[in-house]
Image (cartoon, rainbow, N blue to C red):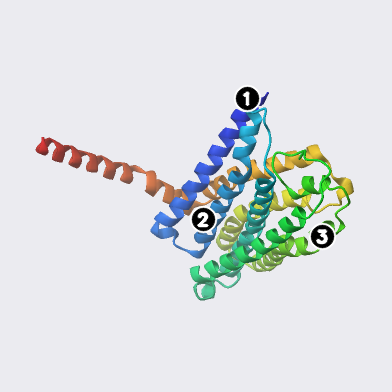
Amino acid sequence: MQPVIFGIVLAMYLVAVTANALLVIVAHADSKLQTPMYFLLSQLSFIDIFLTTITVPQMLVHTLSMNRTISYNRCIIQLFFFMAVGSMEGHLLATMAYDRYVAICDPLRYSAIVSKRLCLQITLTSWVVVSLNSLLYSVLVSCLTFCDNLVAHFFCDITPLLQLSCTRPVVNEILIFTEGVAVVVSPFFFILASYARIGIAIAHMHSVAALRKALSTCSSHILVVLLLYGSVIRMYLRPSSNYNLDQDRQVAVFYTVVIPMVNPLIYSLRNQEVKGALRRLFGKDCIARNFQCGLQANKEWQHIS
């Protein structure tokens, strides 16, 4: 089954990278998408590319290889980047929830409150916070004494590494359920609070068109939030006594392969502006321009000849 698994995972990885890269290009190339919302969406696509690239290529190599090893330093580095990028995705979704909250609850002041500069500042600050948090975890894991070197996972995640410790890493477990909750889960509570306010605003809408527009604006984001935090809560926020390796690997595949592939499809298929930008980028007008440029180049070539 290894060649079959390799082909399936490789196809999903290529779809994820291509779809997210295309969304990043469209968000930066189309003049109509130069808004804070699409800036955040492009950052989310970049995060998905980074997240799946941290784990999947190595998994593909190990799927067909008999030498499934990783050096200690590479393992710690992989842990650092995986935790930083994974945490950053939650912070971006929280920022996008705030963007939707202002757009629906205070639309007249939206341009004055939410700007691309503000989103950039929040993004940079979030990167600093998640990087320091990930560095703390990586240092604590590197200080452990391991009784075995067999990581029963397809990448170096914190839970499988803690399972290899000779003694119960009480400090690490306490850290996961305190500081980890503060950094990883606090964006989720912020998202819930934002949507609680949005729900109140929607309940007071008397226009069916406004209600439909508000629900359409939030539906894609809500679906992505449910996919992400459903996986995160299942993987990390549970006692170590309830740890199930097989289930954890299945959730990890869903989190690192399926979600990065599905996210751009959710936002592109359910968003008329993104679909319009894609048509403008690859539509008939673009093809016609390319054809005219080809004709012109052909005439110049014939003249030179």
Cα–Cα span, label 1 and label 2: 33 Å
Q: Give the residue pinned by disc 3.
A: 177
Question: What label does residue 42 carry, if any?
Answer: 2
Cα–Cα span, label 1 and label 3: 39 Å
| Rendered position, 149 above or below 31 | above
Q: Amino acid at mark 2?
A: Ser
> Label 2's element?
helix
Q: Amino acid at mark 3?
A: Phe
Count of numbered circles in the view: 3
Cα–Cα span, label 3 and label 2: 31 Å
Task: Give the quarter of the image for residue 93.
Answer: bottom right
Q: Amino acid at mark 1?
A: Pro
> Label 3's element?
helix
Please identify the quadrant where the C terminus is shown.
Answer: top left
Question: What label does residue 93 carry, if any?
Answer: none
> Label 1's element?
helix
Question: What label does residue 3 carry, if any?
Answer: 1
Mark in the foreground, 3 or 2: 3
Q: Between residue 150 and residue 157, name the one nearer to us.
A: 150
Q: Who comes first in sequence, dot 1 or dot 3?
A: 1
Task: Give the quarter of the image for residue 187.
Answer: bottom right
Taking the image as shown, residue 62 lies to the left or right of residue 233, namely left
Q: Who comes first in sequence, dot 1 or dot 2?
A: 1
- Are dots 1 and 3 in contact, CB under 8 Å? no
